Structures are given as structure tokens and as C-alpha cells.
Image (spheres, coloured by chain):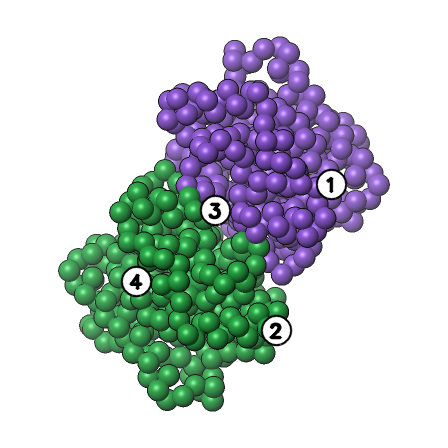
Chain colours: A green, B purple
Amino acid sequence: MKSILAIHGGAGTITRSSMSEEMEAAYLQGLRDALEAGRIAYLRGDAAEDICAAAVVSLEENPLYNAGKGAVFTHAGDHEMDAAMMRGSDLAAGAVAGVRFVRNPVLLARAVMKYEEHVLLSGTGADAFARLQGLETVSNNWFDTPHRRLQYEQALAEDIIILDHHEKKFGTVGAVALDLKNNIAAATSTGGMTNKKFGRIGDSPLIGSGTYANNETCAVSCTGHGEYFIRYAVAYDLSCRIAYGKQTLNDAADELIYKVLQDAGGEGGLIAINRLGEVTLPFNSPGMYRGILHENGDVEVAIYRS
Amino acid sequence: MKSILAIHGGAGTITRSSMSEEMEAAYLQGLRDALEAGRIAYLRGDAAEDICAAAVVSLEENPLYNAGKGAVFTHAGDHEMDAAMMRGSDLAAGAVAGVRFVRNPVLLARAVMKYEEHVLLSGTGADAFARLQGLETVSNNWFDTPHRRLQYEQALAEDIIILDHHEKKFGTVGAVALDLKNNIAAATSTGGMTNKKFGRIGDSPLIGSGTYANNETCAVSCTGHGEYFIRYAVAYDLSCRIAYGKQTLNDAADELIYKVLQDAGGEGGLIAINRLGEVTLPFNSPGMYRGILHENGDVEVAIYRS
């Protein structure tokens, strides 16, 4: 069955036993809402990158997911967000790292991509660019949620960077899409790790690590322990396995996530799509928030390993 | 002839007609000094990453090259530097972006790599990490040189980001090395582009874009128009052409630099080494400051296309 959009909302130790029915229903509804936002964009003929943007904005606005509203707290007690976007038709790419004031980081990544001069902007300079581009900015505490503040206070008390070493959660959101003109694109957005220090940047805004798109191979968005995804250049590795190794999308993604990354101790997953409308959503952690929109309008959403 | 170290000091419109004899001699001596620093490290049995660090520190300390002392000015009139290091034996990697106070950014990249928890640190957080690690810090204006200030004032007056659109120069320094234990590594360091704005980060500190090392394939450091090197994931692409495409180091590098990048309009070059001590130094710009140290102690340095 041909698919046109896949999304993720992060991977990690997400188990049925640790989740109330109400929470589970809310997370699943968030995935359905994001797919619906993407479906509307698809049907009105939006380009693949704009379908991705619509789905990712929906997840950024959802306080449950660690991107935009509901982003985790840094060690300093505020929010620093990263996002990236790449277009498969011409390899145009845009990304931002450590932004604090733009309401929807993925829209800033798109603005950087369209502006063309640079690929990756960071920090206060990136926020200044957001204002110049007329994107909506908010105060940094607009991103606060009671749930994330509690996680932060616990992490601070225990002096740990990842929320819980026994219960790793890698909050990221992402989308990969195929549009009516048969182009593909990818986008990723994240608040990073709770209690992160030293201006740490993960894989999400790094083209080739957490995000990549090329019409010839695939569009991919990753979620997981970012340092592994950087060292293994996961997003671009998937593309190269297809381009140079002549693997299928599915085989390439399975080998990468279940063998290479798993053997290295790199926890996480990815979503990918190609121009045929084939999708793959492998993850080696107990759960990954994920969803697929098929061309016929059917929707699938899931959290745990089936 | 087996080689153990290759270095570069940036690529671009570097032509014999635009260079005085004195300047040429000074640039070549800087390359020889860096190779000598690497040779001493090699002979005392240093690991590949430390041979790279020795050579790159020498170029950072040299005010002629755009890294460390002599780094270009940002739009705001100060210096923001990037660096990365990767070790081929275990894919350990460390990088920093937008640092302002650490005297030798490559040593901070190495410290991040050894600290292991993160791969990429940025901005004031990265400088704070440098102080915690006991690395030497300096005031930001320590990096000033009269030559770079003049370039900056010209760029500011003309409101251009790259120094000169007719005379593109991509100042970066880098090294790739093979040690006595037959491990390889890569390191890159840069001051970025003169008059850069918005916290722009180029390819140098991005693992897989400007810097990559894997014992199974090659160690590579890039220099050029960073945005192209990010979108084409040049450093990791070279590795994948060898790993999945079964190309030789030389064929892979030539196709990437002279065909893929050149066709896309991406100006620059790279240096790479493998465990056999084969090196390649392709560049599609008029010049690239470059040097090779062979196992027998012979040294080659060059600037222009031969």
C-alpha cells in the first residue's frame, strides 16, 4: 500500500506498563492530529517539505511531545531547541540549533532552507534571523509545561543529563513525506535532552545525522541517543546503503537500526520514505511514537513494539 | 610511497599572481612547521588523533591561517571558531561550534571526544566546558590580526559575507594521520567566513560533513564552501563510496570533488588517508594549501594546482 507520510514522536523506554490509558490515548491522538495536518497539506498540493512542516508543527504545538511547546528544560532551566529540514528534489537544506524564542523551530529551519545562503544557524543569531523572517517569536517560558518542569527538577536533583538512565526517552518529532509531484522531504524538531549542559547539540539539526532527503534514495528523520546517530551518520548512511550498496529501503534500515546501531549500543529508530511511497519505521528501543498516512487516506498509529 | 600525515590550510582562489614571494614562502613554511609538529608526535608514538592535534595546533597558532590566532572576524566584529576530531579505531568523535575563548579549538574538540558523553558542544557552554577541562583560554581579541581586521572592514563596507565573491577563499585547517599502531584519525579547525552572521555553522565541526574517520575506510578533513559540504555530507560520502561502493580512496575522492561537487557548484577540496598510508588531496578550486609527510620523513608542500 502506497504511503505518503510517516511521522515519529520520539523513541525510548516507552512501555505499556508505564503508561496510563488516558496518556496513551492522548499520545495516539497527537499522532493522528499530526497525520491529519499532513493530509490536509498533501491534498491541497503542498510540496513535500510543507507536508512535513504541517505535521511537525502539529507535534511542536502538542505539549506532550519534546519539541516546541513542551520542550524539555536545559541545565540552566530554560529551553534550547533544534530543528532541520531537507528537500529531496535539489538537496536544499536548512537547520537551526539552540534557538530559544521562535515558536515553531521547524518553520525557522524551512526559512533557512529557502533563504539558501546558509544551512545551519545557531543560538541568538538564529533567533535574530527568525525575527527578520517575520516568524512568530515567544518568550522562552512559553515553552514551559508542568510535566517538563517536574522532570527537570528531578534530573537536577539527581544531577543526570538524560531524564532517567533506567528509562531512557529520546524526545524528538519528525516527518517524512511524498508529495503529488513525487518529491520527498524530511524534517525533525526537538527540545533535546533534559538537563543538557554545555550547549550540547544532538543529531536532529545535523544534515546527514538526524535528517536527510534525496529523491534518488529516501527521506529520513531519526530519533534516539543523538551521539550515536552523529558518529554513525545514520540518516546519510541509510541513503548510501541504497545508492552505493544497492540495498532496498527496508533492508538498509533494518541492518542499520537492528544490527549496526544496536551492536554499538545506540538506542533509537528512524522513519523513512522513498518516491515509490514505501515507508519503514524501525526502532531498537522498547517503543517509538509513530504513524503512517497511506495514499488512500488510511492511518496507522502505534507506540510499542508489536 | 607510504604517507603518515596530510594537512590542509584552506582552499579557494589562491593563485600565483595574487601572492607575493614573501607571502608564498611564509605560507609554505607554515605547512612545513605543521608537518614537523606532526612528525615529532608520530615518532614518539602518539595516537593518530594526537598527531592530528599537533599539526592542527601548529596551524591554529599561525596567524596566516584562518583558525585560532588569525581567525576571521564575524559580522559582530569578534571571532567564533569551530573544530572537530574523529578517531577511526572506535568512531569516537568530538566537536565544538561557535567557541570564542579557547586558545586552541582543536584541543577542545579532542577533550569533548575523550569526555565521551557528548559529541558536539556549542557557544558559551562549550567555552565553559573548556575551562572545566583546564584548557587555556584567552580574551576574544587575542585572535585579532591586522590582516583579518582589514578583510573584515572591507567585507562590512561591502556588506558581503564571504570576503570576496570574485576571489573566494575558504579558510580552514585540517589534518589526517596514520599512527604506528595503524590507526587513523582526522581533525579540522576554522574561524569560518568573514562577516558571517546569524550564528552560522559551517561543515568543519560536523561529523560526516567536514570531518570523519573510520579505520575500515579512511580519515578525511574538508575545506571549501561549507554549505555544499553539509548538503553532500562529503566526508561521510567518501567513506561510503569505499565501504558500500567498493571504490578506491583515490577514485572515490576524485569522483566526489571533481564530479559531484564541481557539477553542483561546490568549491573546495579534501585530504584523506587510509590504513595503507595512501593519501589523496583533491580540490576543484584554483588552489589549496596542502602538505604530506611520508613515512620515510620526506615532505611535500604545495599551494597551486600543479
All told, the count of numbered labels is 4
Q: Provide the chain ID for the residue under circle 4.
A: A
Front position among marks 3 and 2: 2
Give the class, few, some or many, for how many residues have Cα within 10 Å of label 3's Cα (few <14, many ≥20): many
What residue is pinned by disc 1?
Answer: B51
Disc nearer the start of the sequence (2/4):
4
Residue under pointer 3: B233
Marks 3,2: beta carbons within 8 A: no
Q: Tell me the distance, in whole angstroms, between the alpha carbons under discs 4 and 1.
A: 46 Å
| Residues tagged 2 and 4 counted as in contact (Cβ below 8 A) | no
* Residue at mark 4 to residue at mark 3: CA–CA distance: 27 Å
Answer yes or no: are tags 4 and 3 on the same subunit: no
In the rendered view, does B8 fall on the left or right side of B52?
A: left
Mark 1 vs mark 3: in front? 1
Q: Position of residue A185 (x, y in %)?
A: 32, 56
Q: What residue sits right under mark 4 in the picture? A: A57
Q: Nearer the viewer, residue A34 or A126?
A: A126
Task: For marks 3 and 2, give the CA distance.
Answer: 38 Å
SS category of the residue bearing label 2? helix
- Give the percent coordinates (x, y) of residue A176: 33, 62
